[in-house]
Image (tube, rainbow, N blue to C red):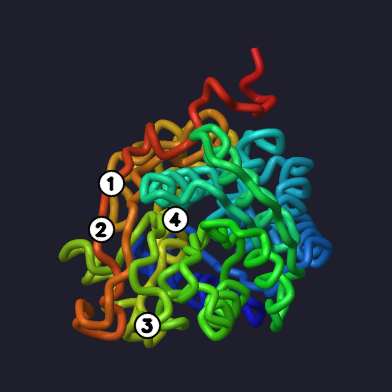
Amino acid sequence: MASLYADVTGPGSEWATRMAIADFGGKVLGRPIELLVADHQTKADIAAAIATKWFDTESVVALLDVAASSPALAVMNAADHRNKIVILNGPGASSITNENCIRTVVHYTYNTYAVAHAVTKAVMDQGGKNWYYLAADYTYGHQLAADSAAVVKANGGEVLGEARAPAGTSDFSSFLLKAQQSKAQVIGLANAGSDLINTVKQASEFGITQGGIKLASLGANINDIYGIGLDATQGMVLADAFYWDTDDQTRAFAKRFSDKMKKMPNMLQAGVYSSTLHYLQAVQAAGTTESDAVMEKMRSMPINDVFAHNGHIRADGMMVHDMYLFQVKTPAESKGPWDLYKRLATIPGDQAYQPLSETRCPLLKK
């Protein structure tokens, strides 16, 4: 609620959840729906303690969002011991549905595999063959860089190195200098939130991008592009699961959201809205909040709403849906403060996510 991810999740995700509860009618199975909110400060131990308390003493039956990968893995462990449902929207690590998969966990909005593959392939198609990574030094950043590097190597490119910066770093000059000295054509930015904003701004200030090196943001969010500005981000290619200005339905949702939050919703907040509705619909269909029965309904019911069309939850817990490749508009192309993207391609869900044939999920081992 007050960390580097507060803008992209935080209060906006809470409001999106409250919108979904209101749209569902505020009750399920004749009982009022109560939402508890806490700030884990992006720390795994605090997240685990909150989840344990909620599950054991507050009668919480499902936990949503979580906002970062390291806290998510800690919460997943607490949930697994209690057979509780966790639906993840902010966290991105692809290990969540691989070696760390749990039968009551759904990875809903996106993962590092989907965004890294889409962006890396697009940049390589534009001629960017040699890469250097600047990664956030925790689970999400490590996984994002690794997923991208696999695409680089598989397509005949070369990874020249990687620097890791602690979360919350304010001065990225030494990391950017190492990247520049590597002579890489592309600096892959495997970070997000305020870390990403500071990295891109400083790369522009130091003249790195003006010198011909391309920045490839593997985890950019529309809030990041808005915060950095079009002058520094124009032409950047990024992958996203949701854009507020796609159609009448997304624009109506965005207006309701922005009337309260004074900004447009991003994919994580739209995903929280969608996953809250899907969970409540599954509880209604199951006639119980018992986790196994609800999970069965969640997997069997297709997802069609403002966030996803024909989405479905696989056996490994991944909610499979289309992803989109966008390019950031130039200042001249933009017609307003949040008019930031133009769509380059739609990536069907069955192509966007890791195929089950490659899974490391122990639930699916033959």
Secondary element under disc 1, as helix, strand or loop, is strand
Tell me which label, 3 or 2, sits earlier in the chain: 3
For label 1, the residue is: 346
Q: Which marked residue is nearer to the observer: mark 1 or mark 4?
A: 1
For label 2, the residue is: 343
Measured as percent of width and height from the top left, residue 129 is found at 50, 46
Tell me which label, 1 or 3, sits earlier in the chain: 3
Q: Dot 1, crowdedness within 10 Å: few (<14), some or many (≥20)?
A: some
Residue displayed at 70% across by 40% down: 83
The C terminus appears in which quarter of the rendering? Answer: top right
Residue displayed at 26% across by 77% down: 339
Measured as percent of width and height from the top left, residue 44 is found at 79, 61
Q: Which mark is residue 354?
A: none
Residue displayed at 38% across by 54% down: 241
Residue farthest to the top, as pictured: 366
| CA distance separating discs 2 and 1 | 8 Å
Residue 261 in sight here = yes
The residue nearer to you, when weighing 289 against 98, is 98
Q: Amino acid at mark 2?
A: Arg
Q: Which mark is residue 231?
A: 3
Tell me which label, 2 or 4, sits earlier in the chain: 4
Tell me which label, 4 or 3, sits earlier in the chain: 4
Residue displayed at 79% across by 57% down: 52
| CA distance separating discs 3 and 2 | 19 Å
Q: Which marked residue is nearer to the observer: mark 3 or mark 2?
A: 3
Measured as percent of width and height from the top left, residue 236 is found at 39, 65
Measured as percent of width and height from the top left, residue 341 is found at 29, 68
For label 4, the residue is: 28
Q: Amino acid at mark 3?
A: Asp
Residues tagged 2 and 1 counted as in contact (Cβ below 8 A): yes
Give the image quarter of residue 206. bottom right
